Image (spheres, rainbow, N blue to C red):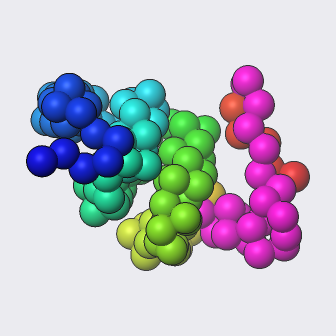
Amino acid sequence: MLRAGLTPISGVMRRLLTGYGLDHYPGRLDLLSDLAYFHEFENILSTLITYYIRACVDQENMETFAELAQKFYYTTVPDGYAALHALRDLFDPGTDKRNIIDLLIAEGEEGDNNIQFTDSGTSLH
């Protein structure tokens, strides 16, 4: 029996997405977005968290890392998951990643999600 909104094809696609795509290319934003889409129909929060954390840990480009962290936050906040705080616990103080996370948290606390994405990258206002 299928859950509402899922078809046999979508279940197969989700398994291919995680079993091949994200296992081989953990930082691909398009694949993570696809996984987030499947989460809208089936609660796969733990899977989503696992892959976003792996992508954030593995990411070496700090602009891409900031974008990943932000998307991780927006994807999981409806479920009550504190993605930025979870990431904050992973990185030592003073590291580039921790500084970015601290800045994102501070910006969020200052109000109304002042973090904007542009075509050329992340802009913090």
Q: Horizontal and vertical percent for residue 64? A: 54, 37
- Relative side of 118 to 86, left or right: right
- Residue 77 is drawn in which quadrant? bottom right
| Residue 35 in picture, x, y percent from top left | 35, 40
Q: Is residue 34 left or right of residue 107?
A: left
Residue 112 drawn in magenta = yes
Q: Position of residue 48 (x, y in %)?
A: 34, 53
Q: Name the residue at 55% across, 59% down.
A: 73
- Closer to the camera, 102 or 39? 39
At x 87% / y 52%, what residue is drawn?
Answer: 125
The correct choice, above or below, for 103 with respect to 85 in the image is above
The residue drawn where x is 40% and y is 33% is 34
Q: Does residue 62 sit above or below 109 in this rendering?
A: above
**Looking at the image, can residue 17 be seen?**
no
Instruction: Specify whether residue 25 is painted magenta.
Output: no
- The magenta region covers 101-120
Number of numbered markers: 0
Q: 11 or 29: which is nearer to us? A: 11
The reply to whether residue 11 is in sight is: yes
Residue 25 lies in quadrant: top left
Q: Residue 7 placed where, x, y %?
A: 24, 33
- Placement of 28 over or under 65, stated as above or below: above
- State the residue at coordinates (37%, 48%): 41
Q: Is residue 51 left or right of residue 79?
A: left
Please name whichever residue, 70 or 101, is drawn nearer the observer in this view of the structure.
Answer: 70
